[in-house]
Structure formats: structure tokens, C-alpha cells
Image (cartoon, rainbow, N blue to C red):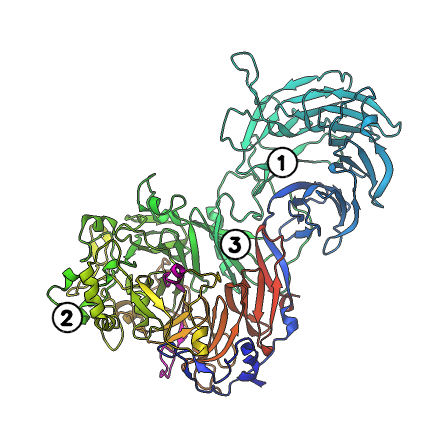
């Protein structure tokens, strides 16, 4: 056991002058004061350097820029090559392996040694590699570099030891697959064609052995020349000269015919009895025009000619569509007898392969499916059904499908019952129309490890959809999908404010907040809207409650001369305190400062919530929608932070204008303040009022405001509403309800929330930090220089950038000490801003269930201000033993379940108090705060800054969190330069991992600590 000072003393190594007993970071004006020496706190030190050997254990998502495809029909495994030199090997769920060529050269072609556990890859650097797949981690056994010729095509016959390699010069080399060296047998292009022919035939584009005789090799040249070469006799059996370029060749299984695809969109069928001209020429998509000419078509890039025992052969090809139809999507064409089916794809076709019952090319093929590799997806088409439907994925390789991924969230150690219940609900919602066939890529073996635990990834998409994924195994499995757009009315094209705010994707997801224990789920959309969902196993008819919040920076937040005519001396400053516009439902009364028709028109949200009762299926059901309003013709600012706490029944969100807190149990807004008003009298910056916009204030008015600046400052320090009770601000709409009186008055339009209670003064627009100029604190100490406002993402900051709005960047509910003199922890809201400022807002929440639904929740700014370098990203709390303090939550209960008269429904809350496990250490807890550049540890309730660590100077932190490792905790940070850094306790040294340069693929990384999993 070591003293806590010993454990964390290394965190001060990069911060000169910041040691134990250093000046406090919690002074009211931002000037450091002497901090008390912390108590002797004992912490079990268990983390060592070996615990932080990070390794990549899983790679989710689809390969970025795929280039090649191969399939082993015996082992049932698939290989995909990419432009960055990666090879992805896929099999049954759980069988997913990633290999990388060290050169990073693009993979041109892949060839399995069928049923032998080996793979040949040909890369763009003209190197052949032989991979051994029989070991736990596939590795390259041999490599062969071509120095003078470029590789264009490879062919490896089934159960053959010879690999045929065609080159750009038209030559064909033969490689011994066992020794992986050149055999010395070379088919020169000038010997393959007639000596009298002087024109070069072009690169080799096709190589294949004859199904009738494996000693015959068919060579296809780009110019249209085809040669069958006798390997034993070292001479050509026949030569074909065609005037259209060749792209691919496919044999009939009898070896008497073969089919070629050409650059003019035609297919030619050749019979070996007569090679002077094609036996048949077809233009599958070329119609005859009025002048009796065929319309021009795109090249057919690949064709496969497969025979069946009991039906006509299949001819399957990609490309060949006519040029005259602009905007047509890529298509795969299936010709079966006289029937032609065109399957349009969402993405360009990279490669396709027909899967057959036999690996032998001289037997009837009996094709049963087509694997199509698209640019961003992999699909399998069932050929045994006449409609050619797709086979349902066992796992999804492509996370975003046809809609772009806009946000992700990862949750570990989820409740064990959450994955089965999501899967059972999601299975009922799955689309029909898929084939009943099993997923054919089913090779390999895999068993669930003993160290697995429930992991869930939530993804948000541009179309407003949300997907829950089971990430417990190696491969992702989609559990449940929901669409947030169903909450809103469909916007008409070109109408509505959403069309002006977001031209496309008005429902795109920006961030999500999920409590797995209570199953409460909250979504933030790009149109400045928030949707709160509850989980239920029963369907229900529900009326969606809508709250509208006015959280905007306006020029009316200072008093104009016209408003002051009868009171020029501000004798009643409380009557002029800034008032935020709060929520209302389905009505848009004008504010006193904007009674123009334009103001009324603009006091509307971006989207329209459905105002009728809707039937919702089991799963996540919308309960509340919160929307920010347009103000004076300007759209609401996008939401930048969000937190929800099921134990408190509260939801907090903020943007660059301020902060709002919603009581979702009572459906009321209990706090709506600008960022400046959050400080009260403890603003660490000296802010000067800017000139208002749009000439709304006259010059005389500005002079009068300057003369009465002290009155304005006093006015800012008042409560955000006219109710001022012991430093707490109460909601204008949170009036105590008498017995039997409903919280939401019912009207002809359904539930309606009053905008303000009776007898309340009209609301005024909130003062915002956006309307203030910021100057640094008047102090020249080392600590004040450290806390000076600097933009984290750029060293060259203009004066305009320094005047940007102060946004609320992170929020965290939890049990803490809102004031220095607090003895017991109380519910608090921690607020972090883009200027590196941390604010604490204590709350008073009724504990009784009936009182909680009737009595208002009160909140008041405590005046606590902590400061860091850069924008604040994360809060975490530790007890005095160094253990992580979890957030309180409510145990999930189904609100739509049938009532049980013997067991009335009651809320079951689980609290984690900082003082519950500290009998030996006394009261108090530690607060770990991380910003873009810095991490600090504060001792609560004294708010003294114990330790400081400058994480990075050359980059900045994107994401950070305090995570549990080996029964201890560490701060993990993901930096913009690709490094994952973990700050540990032993002497403050950090371990880091740099992500490799090829990680621009579209996939998710789950970075795991090796000591936990291996």
C-alpha cells in the first residue's frame, strides 16, 4: 500500500509548479489560492506496465476499397483483397481473420489452393505471395518478385502444382507452387501467335486449363487474340483473332465450347470444331435501333458460363448495359434459357463468383449461388429460386449499409439479459423476402472464449436509423433496428425549416446516450432535436409529448432604450434579469422582444412531431421529443452535449448558446440558461458586451449601457427566473399540483404544456457568452497563464476565433459535492465548456415517488469553477480507495406491462454514494477531469487540484474515459494523431499505441488490454 500522493505524483512531472499542495483551481475569479493538503488516502496500486500492452483483437466493418475475391468451395471460406494490401478471410460467424502485406501494395488477384489451407495473392508491386492458413495467425511462406514484367492475371487449376502467371508483355510464366520458384517454362507472346503477325497482342487477360485436357492452356490477350497452347508439345493448337477486345473467358464443362465477353457489350460463343468465327454472337442489352444498328453498350467485364443437369445453362455477367440510360445503377445480369434478369446493385461491382456444387471443372457445375463483391458490401444471390432473392447475412460485414454512419457508441459489461431481449424483439421486425438458404460462407471453426462478456455497439446513421449490434464475438451481429424519423411528420420537398437547415438527411443522428440498466435511450439529431425512448416488450398506443426550448443568442438580451424609457436608472434590476424562453407544445406565442409577424413565424422547430396517437411495436418506444426553436430567422445551434440519468429522471443538453435541463418524468424544463449565466458571480473571464446585431440598439442606448455597466453586471448575477429562493432557480412551469390535478392539461390537440405559470413575468431572452468578448483574467501567475483560453486544434488562432461562442461540451450527472462546505454528497450536474471551464450545479430532488411526480426539482449554480487547458471532454469520479464510482440508475421496469394489484409499480433506484465505502477514509471523493490537452484530479468537496498532467502538446485528445483494468482504473485517451494513450498511476508514465497507416478502412476498432483477454 502506498500513499495516494505517491501513486499519482508522476502526473505532475510535465506540469512545473503543480505539486501536492499547489494552488487551488477552484477560486471564484480563476486566480489560484492555497489549497489544503489532502488527507492521507490509501490506494491499492496494482497496475504495472505489462497491463498496457495493447493489441488489435478484432476488426469490425467492411474492407475499405476491395479489389479481389476468392472462394474455397470445399472449405467454404472467402477471401477479400483490398487496395491497401489487406486480405480479409471470412467463414462462419466468429471466423474472421485479417492479414496485411507489408508493402501495402494493392491486391490484384487471389487464388485459393482448394482444400489445402493456403492462398496465393498477386499484388500491384508485381509480387506473388503464398499464405499459410493452417496456423492461428496466417503468415506468408514464400514470396516471388517479378522485376522485369508486370503481373496481369494468375490461374491455379484444382489439385495442380503449377501456377500460371500472365504478364503485361503478353508472356506466360509457370511457377512451382510447392517450391514457389519459376519453373523456367515460359510461353513467349511471339511464339503463342503466328510469327507472321507483327502486332503485339497486348497483356494477358485470361488463363485457364481445358476441362477436357489439363495439358491444354487457353490464353486470352487483351486485343482479342485467343490461343490454346499445348503444354507438352510446346505449340499452339489453334489461334483465334477477333476484332473486339476481350475481358474474360469461361469454359463449358465438356471442354468443347467457351464464351468470351467483349468491350462492345457482346458475348461470343466459340466451338472448338470451327474456330474461324464465333458460333454465336449476342448483345444481351443492345437493342436494334431504327436504322437497324445496335445501340452501343458498355463492356462486359466478366462472364461465367455454368451448366445444369436438369435445366438450361446459366450465363452470368457484369456490365454490358447500354450507354443511353444515364444514372443506371451497376447491375448483375443472369441469363437462364430465354429469361434475362437484371439485378441492380447499390454500389459498383468489384468482382463476382458463381458457387457450384463441385470444384472440378469437367463435371456439370450445378450453380446454386452468386457471391457479389461490391464496393461497400458483400451479397449472395440464390440461383435456386426463380426470383433470385438474396441470402440473408448471418452477420453484417458492412455497418452502414446504404446510409452513412454518423455516430457510434460502445458499451461493455452490459446486463446479461439485454442481448437476448434485443435479439428477440429485433427478429420480429426483420424484413421478409430473403432466401431460406443458409449463408454459404460457413467454413472454419470457432468457439466462444471464456473471457467474453456482453458488449454492444450502437450506430447512428444519416437517415435517422439506429442499430444495436452484438459485439461480444469476433463478428458483429445486428440485434435491433429502429427509425427515429417515424416520430415526425414527413416533410414535404422544399418545405419546412428543416430543408433550410439541412438540405439532406434532416434526421441524421449526431449522438446517443444509453443506460443499459434502465434501458432508457436518448438520441440527438442534426435538426436540433432530442428523442427519449423507453423499452417495452409490449406494443402500445402512445401520444408523443413534445417540448420546445428557446435556447438562442439574441441581441435583445441587453435592454434597449425603448424598454428603459420609464426606468432609466435601472432602479429594479431584478425585473430586467435575462429570462430564457422555455418549452411549449403546439403553440408559438411571441416573446415580448419580438412581437413582429416575422418573430412569430420563426418561433418554430425544424421538424413537426406527430400530434396524433400512434401504434408502436415492442422495443424502444418514443416518450418525449425536445426541439430547439428558430429565433429571428436564424436556425437553432446544433446540440453539442447530452446526458441522461434514470435515477434522477433528468435529461441535460447544451450547445454553444447555453444549457437546458429537462425533467422527463414531469415533462417540464427545469433549467434553461445561457453559458454566461451559469457562472453567476464566478465568471473567470472579463467579458465585454459586443455591439448588438442588425442595428437594433441605437448609439445612445449603447452609451447608456456603458454608463450603467455595474448595474448590468449586478443584473446578470440574479436568478435566471424571477423566483429566487435560497440560491435555487425553480422552473416557471414546475408548479406543485394539487391532488387529482393532471400535470399536463388536456386540450383539443392532446397534451399541452403551458409556457409559464400564472402570475409569472414574461420571459426574456437569455444572456449568452456568444454575445460577449472574452479577455483573460487579470493575473500573472503561472496557473492563470496555464488556464488562458487557447484553441486546442490550432496554434495559429485569429482574434475572430478567440471570440467564438463558449459551448457546453460535456455533461455528467452524479452524486457529488456542489459546494465546498457540503458535508454529504447530493445529486449534481457537472458541466464542461469549450473554454476548459468546469461548473457544478447542485440539485434538490424529491426522494418519495409520489412527491417526485408532483414536486419540482430545483437547481442552482453553486459558483464552483474549475479550469483546464482545452475543451473539457470527460468527467469520472473515484472514491478515496481509487475505485470507480458508477452513476446512479433506475432498475428497468416495463411501463406497458399488465398491472399487478398485489405488487404496485414503484421505482427501484440504485445509488453509488462516494461515502458509502469510505468508513476508514472519511467523506469525499476524487474527480478526474480530462480535456483536449490536460488531465486533472480534484479532491471534493474542497475542490483542491491535487495533480495535473499535460497529455499532449503536439496534438489533442478526441475521446477519453476512465476505464477499469485489472481491478484498478486508468485514464484512456484517443488522440488526433492516431495514438491511444493510457495514463496510469505508477509514476505517471503513459503507454501509447499508434494506429497503423492503413486504418482508413471503414471499420471499428475495439482496443483491448491484453492482460484481461489473454
Q: Which residue is mark 1?
A: 370
Q: Residues within 10 Å of mark 3 (few under 14, many from 20)?
A: many
- 473 vs 383: above or below: below
Q: Which quadrant is the C terminus positioned in?
A: bottom right
Q: How many marks on residues?
A: 3
Indicate which disc residue 569 carries.
2
Q: Which quadrant is the N terminus positioned in?
A: bottom right
- 693 vs 674: above or below: above
Residue 805 covered by magenta stretch: yes
Residue 300 position in % (x across, y down): 62, 28
Helix or strand or loop: what does disc 1 sit on? strand
Mark found first going from the N terminus, 3 or 1:
1
- 882 vs 894: above or below: below
Residue 190 located left or right of residue 996: right
Q: Which residue is mark 3?
A: 469
Q: Nearer the viewer, residue 665 or 1?
A: 1
Q: Quadrant of residue 275?
A: top right
Q: Residue at x 52, y 54 (%)?
A: 469
How far is the residue under mark 3 from the one under mark 2? 62 Å
How far is the residue under mark 1 from the one under mark 2? 83 Å
Q: Which residues are magenta?
A: 799-825
Q: Nearer the viewer, residue 437 or 102?
A: 102
Q: Residue at x 39, y 48 (%)?
A: 507
Helix or strand or loop: what does disc 2 sit on? loop
Between circles 3 and 2, the one closer to the viewer is 2
Is residue 740 at all visible to an observer of this figure? no
Helix or strand or loop: what does disc 3 sit on? strand
Residue 672 covered by magenta stretch: no
Q: Residues within 10 Å of mark 1 (few under 14, many from 20)?
A: many
Residue 257 position in % (x across, y down): 74, 22
Amino acid at each position: 500500500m502506498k500513499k495516494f500522493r505517491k501513486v499519482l505524483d508522476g502526473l505532475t512531472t510535465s506540469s512545473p509548479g503543480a505539486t501536492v499542495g499547489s494552488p487551488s483551481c477552484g477560486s471564484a475569479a480563476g486566480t489560484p489560492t492555497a489549497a489544503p493538503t489532502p488527507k492521507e488516502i490509501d490506494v491499492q496500486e496494482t497496475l504495472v506496465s505489462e497491463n498496457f500492452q495493447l493489441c488489435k483483437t478484432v476488426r469490425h466493418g467492411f474492407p475499405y476499397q476491395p479489389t479481389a475475391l476468392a472462394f474455397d468451395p470445399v472449405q467454404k471460406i472467402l477471401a477479400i483483397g483490398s487496395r491497401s494490401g489487406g486480405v480479409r478471410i471470412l467463414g462462419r460467424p466468429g471466423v474472421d481473420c485479417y492479414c496485411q502485406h507489408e508493402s501495402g501494395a494493392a491486391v490484384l488477384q487471389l487464388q485459393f489452393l482448394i482444400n489445402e489451407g493456403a492462398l496465393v495473392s498477386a499484388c500491384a508491386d508485381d509480387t506473388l505471395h503464398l499464405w499459410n492458413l493452417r496456423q492461428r495467425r496466417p503468415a506468408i511462406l514464400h514470396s516471388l518478385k517479378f522485376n522485369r514484367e508486370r503481373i496481369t492475371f494468375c490461374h491455379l487449376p484444382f489439385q495442380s502444382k503449377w501456377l500460371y502467371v500472365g504478364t503485361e508483355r503478353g508472356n506466360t510464366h509457370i511457377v512451382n507452387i510447392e517450391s514457389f520458384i519459376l519453373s523456367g517454362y515460359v510461353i513467349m507472346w511471339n511464339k503463342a501467335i503466328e510469327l507472321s503477325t507483327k502486332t503485339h497482342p497486348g497483356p494477358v487477360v485470361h488463363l485457364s486449363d481445358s476441362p477436357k485436357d489439363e495439358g491444354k492452356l487457353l490464353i486470352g490477350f487483351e486485343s482479342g487474340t485467343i490461343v490454346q497452347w499445348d503444354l507438352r508439345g510446346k505449340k499452339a493448337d489453334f489461334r483465334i483473332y477477333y476484332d473486339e477486345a476481350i475481358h474474360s473467358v469461361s469454359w463449358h464443362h465438356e471442354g468443347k465450347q467457351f464464351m468470351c465477353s467483349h468491350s462492345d457489350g457482346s458475348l461470343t460463343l466459340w466451338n472448338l470444331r470451327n474456330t474461324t468465327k464465333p458460333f454465336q454472337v449476342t448483345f444481351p442489352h443492345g437493342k436494334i435501333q431504327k436504322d437497324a444498328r445496335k445501340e452501343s453498350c458498355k463492356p462486359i467485364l466478366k462472364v461465367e458460363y455454368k451448366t445444369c443437369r436438369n435445366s438450361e445453362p446459366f450465363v452470368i455477367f457484369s456490365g454490358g448495359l447500354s450507354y443511353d440510360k444515364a444514372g443506371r445503377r451497376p447491375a448483375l445480369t443472369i441469363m437462364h434459357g430465354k429469361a434475362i434478369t437484371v439485378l441492380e446493385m447499390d454500389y459498383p461491382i468489384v468482382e463476382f463468383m458463381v458457387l457450384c456444387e463441385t470444384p472440378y471443372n469437367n463435371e456439370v457445375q450445378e450453380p446454386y449461388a452468386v457471391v457479389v463483391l461490391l464496393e461497400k458490401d458483400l451479397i449472395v444471390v440464390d440461383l435456386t429460386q426463380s426470383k433470385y432473392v438474396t441470402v440473408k447475412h448471418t452477420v453484417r460485414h458492412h455497418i452502414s449499409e446504404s446510409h452513412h454512419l454518423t455516430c457510434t457508441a460502445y458499451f461493455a459489461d452490459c446486463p446479461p439479459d439485454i442481448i437476448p431481449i434485443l435479439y428477440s424483439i429485433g427478429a420480429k421486425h426483420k424484413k421478409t423476402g430473403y432466401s431460406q438458404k443458409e449463408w454459404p460462407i460457413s467454413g472454419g471453426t470457432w468457439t466462444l472464449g471464456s473471457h467474453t462478456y456482453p458488449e454492444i455497439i450502437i450506430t447512428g446513421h444519416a437517415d435517422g436509423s439506429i442499430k444495436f449490434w452484438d459485439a461480444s464475438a469476433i463478428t458483429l451481429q445486428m440485434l435491433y433496428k429502429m427509425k427515429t424519423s417515424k416520430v415526425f411528420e414527413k416533410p414535404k420537398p422544399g418545405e419546412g425549416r428543416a430543408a433550410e437547415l439541412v438540405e439532406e438527411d434532416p434526421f441524421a443522428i449526431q449522438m446517443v446516450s444509453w443506460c443499459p440498466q434502465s434501458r432508457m435511450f436518448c438520441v440527438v439529431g442534426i435538426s436540433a432535436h432530442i428523442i427519449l425512448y423507453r423499452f417495452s416488450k409490449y406494443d402500445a398506443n402512445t401520444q408523443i409529448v413534445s417540448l420546445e426550448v428557446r435556447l438562442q443568442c439574441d441581441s435583445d438580451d441587453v435592454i434597449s432604450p425603448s424598454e428603459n424609457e420609464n426606468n432609466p436608472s435601472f432602479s429594479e434590476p431584478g425585473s430586467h434579469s435575462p429570462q430564457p424562453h422555455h418549452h411549449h407544445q403546439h403553440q408559438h406565442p411571441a416573446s415580448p422582444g419580438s412581437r413582429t409577424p416575422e418573430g412569430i413565424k420563426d418561433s418554430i422547430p425544424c421538424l413537426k412531431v406527430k400530434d396524433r396517437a400512434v401504434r408502436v411495436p415492442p422495443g424502444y418506444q418514443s416518450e418525449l421529443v425536445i426541439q430547439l426553436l428558430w429565433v429571428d430567422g436564424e436556425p437553432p445551434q446544433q446540440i453539442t452535449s447530452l446526458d441522461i440519468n434514470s435515477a434522477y429522471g433528468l435529461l441535460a443538453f447544451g450547445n454553444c448558446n447555453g444549457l437546458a435541463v429537462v425533467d422527463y418524468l414531469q415533462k417540464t424544463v427545469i433549467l434553461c440558461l445561457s453559458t454566461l449565466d451559469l457562472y453567476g458571480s464566478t465568471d473567470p473571464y472579463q467579458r465585454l458586451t459586443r455591439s448588438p446585431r442588425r442595428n437594433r440598439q441605437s448609439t445612445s442606448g449603447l452609451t447608456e449601457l456603458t454608463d450603467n455597466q455595474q448595474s448590468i453586471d449586478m443584473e446578470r448575477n440574479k436568478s435566471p427566473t424571477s423566483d429566487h429562493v435560497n440560491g435555487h432557480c425553480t422552473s416557471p412551469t414546475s408548479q406543485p399540483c394539487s391532488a387529482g390535478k393532471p400535470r399536463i392539461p388536456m386540450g383539443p390537440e392532446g397534451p399541452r404544456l403551458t409556457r409559464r405559470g400564472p402570475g409569472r413575468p414574461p420571459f426574456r431572452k437569455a444572456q449568452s457568452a456568444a454575445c460577449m468578448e472574452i479577455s483573460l483574467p487579470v493575473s500573472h501567475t503561472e496557473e492563470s497563464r496555464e488556464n488562458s483560453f487557447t484553441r486546442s486544434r490550432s496554434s495559429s488562432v485569429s482574434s475572430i476565433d478567440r471570440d467564438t461562442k463558449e459551448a457546453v461540451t460535456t455533461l455528467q450527472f452524479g452524486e457529488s459535492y456542489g459546494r465546498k462546505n457540503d458535508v454529504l454528497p447530493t445529486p449534481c450536474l457537472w458541466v464542461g465548456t469549450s473554454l476548459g471551464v468546469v461548473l457544478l450545479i447542485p440539485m434538490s430532488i424529491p426522494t418519495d415517488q409520489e412527491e417526485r411526480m408532483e414536486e419540482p426539482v430545483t437547481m442552482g449554480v453553486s459558483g464552483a469553477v474549475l479550469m483546464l487547458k482545452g475543451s473539457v471532454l470527460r468527467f469520472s469520479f473515484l472514491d478515496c480507495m481509487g475505485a470507480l464510482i458508477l452513476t446512479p440508475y433506475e432498475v428497468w421496469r416495463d411501463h406497458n406491462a399488465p398491472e399487478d394489484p398485489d405488487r404496485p409499480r414503484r421505482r427501484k433506484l440504485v445509488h453509488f454514494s462516494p461515502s458509502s465505502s469510505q468508513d476508514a477514509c472519511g467523506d469525499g471523493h476524487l474527480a478526474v477531469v480530462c480535456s483536449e490537452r490536460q488531465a486533472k484530479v480534484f479532491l471534493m468537496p474542497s475542490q483542491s487540484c491535487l495533480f495535473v498532467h499535460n497529455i499532449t502538446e503536439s496534438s489533442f485528445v478526441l475521446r477519453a474515459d476512465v476505464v477499469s483494468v485489472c481491478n484498478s482504473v486508468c485514464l484512456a485517451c484517443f488522440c488526433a494523431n492516431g495514438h491511444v494513450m493510457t495514463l496510469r498511476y505508477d509514476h505517471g508514465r503513459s503507454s501509447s499505441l499508434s494506429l497503423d497507416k492503413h486504418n482508413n478502412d471503414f471499420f471499428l476498432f475495439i482496443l483491448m488490454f491484453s492482460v484481461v483477454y489473454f
